[in-house]
Every structure is written in structure tokens, then in C-alpha cells.
Amino acid sequence: MSLTRRLLSFSTIPAFSALIPFLILPVIAYAAGDASWVAIGVGQSIGGFLALAVALGLNVQGPTLVALAPAADRAALFARGTRARLVLVAPAIVVGSVLAWLLAPEGARLESLLMAIAITLGGLTSSWYLIGLGTPLPLIGFELLPRALATAAGAALVVTGGDGLVWAYPTLLIVAIVGGIGAYVLRTVTPRDLVTGWRDSLRFARRQLSAAGTEVVSGAYTALAVSIVTLGTTTAQTGVYISGDKLWRMGQTVVGAQGNALQGWVVEDDRAHFGHRVRRALLLHAVLGLVGFAAFALLGPWLTGLLFEDHVIDRPTAILFGIATFCLSMSTATGRHVLIAWGLPRAVFASVVVGAVVGVPASLLLAGQLGALGGAIGLAAAEGCVLLVQVAMILIRRRRT
């Protein structure tokens, strides 16, 4: 598959699939109250973090594993990865439900709990496997379309019933995610493949610990950012931060989709074109990051006012979200396309640990002092640290070799 087709397929389809849960947010902002708005944001935050744990690092390393595996072994690899994640999803749902219930505003806890469950289940996605295969179309039928239908129906119900029917949207989303992912899994492997080979899956999970740790630790200052800000500041300031965070998540989704699209391509043909393709990947991510920065800096306050009514971010907060977007785009390239391709997942893990050590306490402390602006400072600081550490590791490795 050509680079252009790969980008169009595997940047747009997974991006749309991941963005769909956020499309209902303007409807909630206009048709429901502040409590429902914050509750859905908290549920998405907690569920997004736990989905990273359930994904077991396959968003980071999965496409590369599939692209390098012999064709005859790929279905077995998919079954192995699915079994390993099924072990994680039940405890993740329990933890997410409890946290969402405790952190959500009074009167909107059920909505937050259901939203956390829905987003957590998204960690079972088959996108890593399909990206590695270079087969984008099943993502539309099995993941994008069911979620789009659930979102459309949920939006209609919220407009009709306001706060009283917000719970219906995450419920429909749960049905769509479980049905779509389950249908593709059963199309690809047999039910027997899902209940046998547990030792093999546990060995696979142990090999994925570095990649999984990378996702989970980075989620502490990205996916959990809303929950951290909720602990540090008022409900009103949390609502403002959520507006910026939702635009940031949309940008993060596009960046991640482009990273996934390029990941298998960089190492194809046994890395025969590795150097040239890495340089192109870095350039593409630099362009995407600059576009994201400009969009936030120039349009962030206007967009949040347009989409989320009263929850408007100011210009400094928008600029900080833009800086975080640029750093994320570049570290996606330096991490996934260089360090992971070099077989150094622990180096990527070390970089996100630095980001978490800086970002989590900064977001918590500064949110208490500066509200939404403080949370954005913590996020930008975390993403900047990750990028600087990864660039330093790449330069050190190049000097040695």
C-alpha cells in the first residue's frame, strides 16, 4: 500500500472511530446541565486511562509486531493479544466504575460510570491488528459505523430528554463497542481460540510490559488530566479545562492515528528503507504538530465557545494546549518510529516516566492556583519533557553507533 493511501486509510478511519464519543459533547453542553457535562468528561478521562491499560501496549507496538510477523502466524498473534486483554478488561471496568462514581458531581454519577465503562471497553479494539495487516475497511464496518449510529441515537435522546436521558448515550455506546469488536474477533478466530492458550497469552503479556507501561504512565498526565484537575480546582474551572481537553483529545487522536499508519510502513520489507522513511515520518509529524499548535493558538477560544457554549478557554490556555499538541506529535515519531523500531521500548517508557513525574504534580498543584490554565501548564510541561528525553536518547544512540 502506498504512503498516501496508508495515511488516508489509517489516519482517517481510526481517528473518526476514536473521535465519535466526543461528537456528542456539544449536544450535552447545550441540552444538559453542568453536572452532566463534567460527569461525561470525568468518565471519558477515567475510561481513556483504563483503556490504555487494557490495550496492553498494542497501540504502541502492535502494528510493528503484525507487520514483521509471518503471514501464517498473524491470526494466532491476534488471538494471543485478544486473550491477554480479556483478562484485564473486567478488573479495569470495576476500578473505572468506582472512580467515576466517586469523582463525578452529585446527581450525575450514573452517567459518569457508564461513560467510563464504554471508553474502557475501547481498549479491546482490533485496530492495531488491521493497521499491521494494511487492511482498513473492516474498521469502518465493525468499529466506526456502530459507534456513529450509537452516537447519533444518543444525541437525539439527549436533545429530547436533556439531563434525564444523558445515561442513554454511554449505554448505547457500550452495546456498539462490544457488538462491533466482538463480531470482528469471531470473524477472525474461533471461539476455541479465545478460551485456550492462556499460558501463551501470559507470556505475550509479559513481553508487552514495557509498551503497556509506556501507555499507562503517559495516560497519567494525558487521559487522567481531567480527573487530576477535578481534584485540584472548582467544578467551574474543571468545566473550562474539559473544553480544552476535548479539543486536545481530538488532536491527540489524529496524531495517534497518523503514528499508527506510519508505524508498520517504517519497518516494512525488513527495514530496507528505514532511514529514508523515518525522516519522512518525522517531517509529517512536524507538519501535523505545527498545524495543531496553530489551530489551538488561533482558534482555540473561538472553537470552545462555538462547541461548548459557556466553557471557553482563554488565549494563554489555548497556546499551552497547542504546545502540548506539537510536542505529542513529535514524540510520537521519535518514540514509535525511531526508538520502538530500534527495539528500545524501555527508552520510551523512561521518557514517559519523566513526563509523568513532572506533569502530574504540576497539573495538580497549578490547577489549585490557576484553574484551567494551571492544568494546561502541567500538560504542556509533561509532553515537552517526554520529547526532550527521547531526542536526547536518539542523539546518544547515534553517537555510539
Image (cartoon, rainbow, N blue to C red):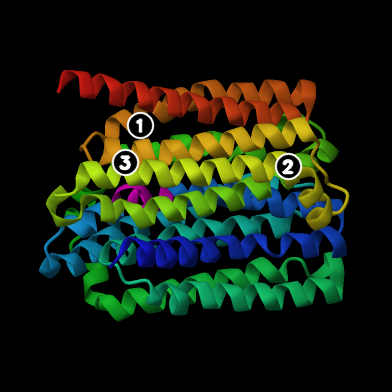
Judge depth for marks 2 and 1 and give the one in front: 2
Residue 40's x, y, as percent? 71, 55
Main SS, magenta residues: helix
Q: Earlier in the sequence, mark 3 or mark 1?
A: 3
Location of mark 2 (residue): 298
Residue 400's x, y, as percent? 17, 19
Of the numbered discs in the image, which one, if any, rests on residue 349? Answer: 1
Could you tell me the amino acid type at mark 2?
Answer: Leu
Instruction: Tell me which corner region of the image, top left, top right, bottom left or bottom right, holds residue 154.
Output: bottom right
Tell me where the magenta segment starts and ends, as one range: 53-61
Q: Give neighbour class at mark 1: few <14, some 14-19, many 20+ (Cα, 10 Å).
A: many
Residue 267's x, y, as percent? 21, 50
**Above or below — where is 7 with respect to 202?**
below
Asked whether residue 60 is drawn in magenta, I would say: yes
Asked whether residue 142 is drawn in magenta, I would say: no
Instruction: Tell me which corner region of the image, top left, top right, bottom left or bottom right, holds residue 173.
Output: bottom right
Identified at 58% across, 61% down, the residue is: 19
Marks 2 and 1, Cα distance to the nearest angstrom?
33 Å
Could you tell me the amino acid type at mark 3?
Answer: Arg
Q: Earlier in the sequence, mark 2 or mark 3?
A: 3
Pointer 2 and pointer 3: residues touching (CB < 8 Å)? no
Pointer 2 and pointer 1: residues touching (CB < 8 Å)? no
Could you tell me the amino acid type at mark 1?
Answer: Phe
Quarter of the image for the C terminus: give it.
top left
Identified at 55% across, 34% down, the residue is: 221
Q: Give neighbour class at mark 3: few <14, some 14-19, many 20+ (Cα, 10 Å).
A: some
Q: Is residue 110 left or right of residue 138?
A: right
Location of mark 3 (residue): 279
